[in-house]
Image: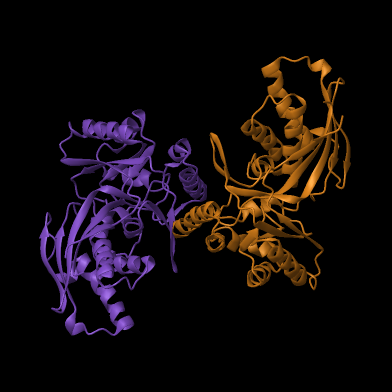
Chain colours: A purple, B orange
Amino acid sequence: MKGIKIFSPATVANLACGFDVIGLALDFPKDEIFLYKSNNPGIRINKIYGSPLPHDPRKNVAFVALQSLLKKYKQKQRFDETKIGFEIELIKNIHPGSGIGSSAASAAGIVYGANILLGNPFNTIQLIRFAMEGERIASGTAHADNVAPAIMGGVTLVRSYQPLDITRLHTPNELWISIIHPQIEVKTSDAREILKQKILMTDAIKQWGNVGALIAGLYQENYELISRSLEDVIVEPIRAMLIPAFYELKIKCKEIGALGGGISGSGPSVFMLSKGNQTAKKVTEIMNRVYSPLKVDYKTYTSPINQKGIKWIQLS
Amino acid sequence: MKGIKIFSPATVANLACGFDVIGLALDFPKDEIFLYKSNNPGIRINKIYGSPLPHDPRKNVAFVALQSLLKKYKQKQRFDETKIGFEIELIKNIHPGSGIGSSAASAAGIVYGANILLGNPFNTIQLIRFAMEGERIASGTAHADNVAPAIMGGVTLVRSYQPLDITRLHTPNELWISIIHPQIEVKTSDAREILKQKILMTDAIKQWGNVGALIAGLYQENYELISRSLEDVIVEPIRAMLIPAFYELKIKCKEIGALGGGISGSGPSVFMLSKGNQTAKKVTEIMNRVYSPLKVDYKTYTSPINQKGIKWIQLS
């Protein structure tokens, strides 16, 4: 096998109360990556469609992630590096800066695909580590809460970074998501800076009560409990101001039947979870209605939760 | 039915990372309560064995909890209060001040029993509320993290107090607990006072990552994940100084195979969870060995997790 096409999903990190620890994968939108192994040494990104991403490889997350994988592969296999190379074409359907894991999709997709073409020398946690190196280029920190759900699918929990400890959580099949991406710029670094370094103990206790209940709700498939737990008393009250009409959006989506939601990653996208396709579609419709009078371009998506993570097909 | 005997279990609150939210019930030790309904109006605590508890009813948690139930029952049933009364005998096997839910066992047991004798007019969450009124007398705050597992059994999560929202979590059958109760006094109010009102955001994130992983570990019956998650980076580092030889105890118990543990409630008892009876017994043995050279009286217990909560038998 020399070539594969990889479908790498959008992801939502900072799932309400699960700030910095809980993320999930979407079925749609997803990036498409054409990846070929060749005898021509080096990594070449030949084309990037749909986004003005840097062709300079050192600034490209896919390049950096794949390079990190190859570095380990060399140590492991002592392969003849003069005889192995990769050709890449990226179709970016996930808009960079949208807050739904655009860089993670590139980084996770490329290492996942390269692992297949090399005969699966690496396990899931190793692939997540390589992809995190791509995230470091994109946002300054090697976080895992987008790449983990992209690779593992479903809802994931990053318990710790030292050592890296990630768990795939039970994810009910009826869980759907609605996303609105207001096309404004929110820099991850700015979104980080406005957060407080110290928080009230009483708020922290509420937050971990909600994290616990959200995870119990997922395992019990108890949608009412999931709904009550989708509450962030620490980060959302500060970051909400970065998103136009955030509270109106949230209130109206819940009125129509959304379980709850919040800011996706560090924004500007906002997500809402629902039980079932029908409610999720109504929620997305409400998102459109709230945003259509505003002078802000936006896109909306409705998707089931992606249970499998990255998918791929053989090309040659 | 006029009389029942109630077995009300010891409980561990503040389960490591789950400070203020996660608790569990033990099979042993347990209080025994003889409760009789009579035509003689009023609540009479006739005997208390095993502890110098106040005979003054307004200072007795069982009295206050039962009174709170009866107040609601009056509003609900408009019963003839001149014709209903309760006679109580308490056998306190759970030492007051031990930190394993002594007051909760009295409060929860009495309302659970009275509900049966009255024909089950109240649901679980209502019983927890009445028992919490007893807890308010005992510790100054109407907390639920002991009475909830006493009544519901297993491991429980208090997501919120306003409104009261409590979930019974999946509890693996092989989970056992070892307890050491050093017979020193640690006042709950003192243990509260030394805590900080503000904590680092980075610590809080670690804590809710652990809470999430602990609950995922319980549902997955993944003992390694449970073990890695039994970590409290916020409260234990401050309160450990209240417990003689705390760190030695913890290190040696983990060396012998304990999954992990921490301070039970606000101390002085220390708990350790293990997979299976055999390991739990070894852990308790190590607890004895660490404490036997110290000039502190102590008691140890080994128990499975109590899956059912309060149990009872009919007397007449």
- Residue A55 occupies which quadrant of the picture? bottom left
Quadrant for the N terminus of chain A, please.
Answer: bottom left
Q: Residue at x 42, y 42 (%)?
A: A231
Residue B79 visible? The answer is yes
Count all numbered tags in the image, as a single digit: 0
Whole-percent x, y for residue A54 in the image: 13, 64
Of B148 and B257, which appears nearest the observer? B257
Whether A141 is drawn above or below A239: the answer is: below
Q: Residue at x 28, y 62 (%)?
A: A108
Of A110 and B112, which appears nearest the observer? A110
Whole-percent x, y for residue B277 in the image: 70, 61
- Residue A252 occupies which quadrant of the picture? top left
In the displayed structure image, the side of residue A158 where residue B105 appears, left or right: right
Whole-percent x, y for residue A61 in the image: 22, 65
Residue A97 visible? The answer is no
Whether B266 is drawn above or below B76: the answer is: below
Of A154 and A287, which appears nearest the observer? A154
Quadrant for the C terminus of chain A, please.
Answer: bottom left
Q: Residue at x 23, y 61 (%)?
A: A106
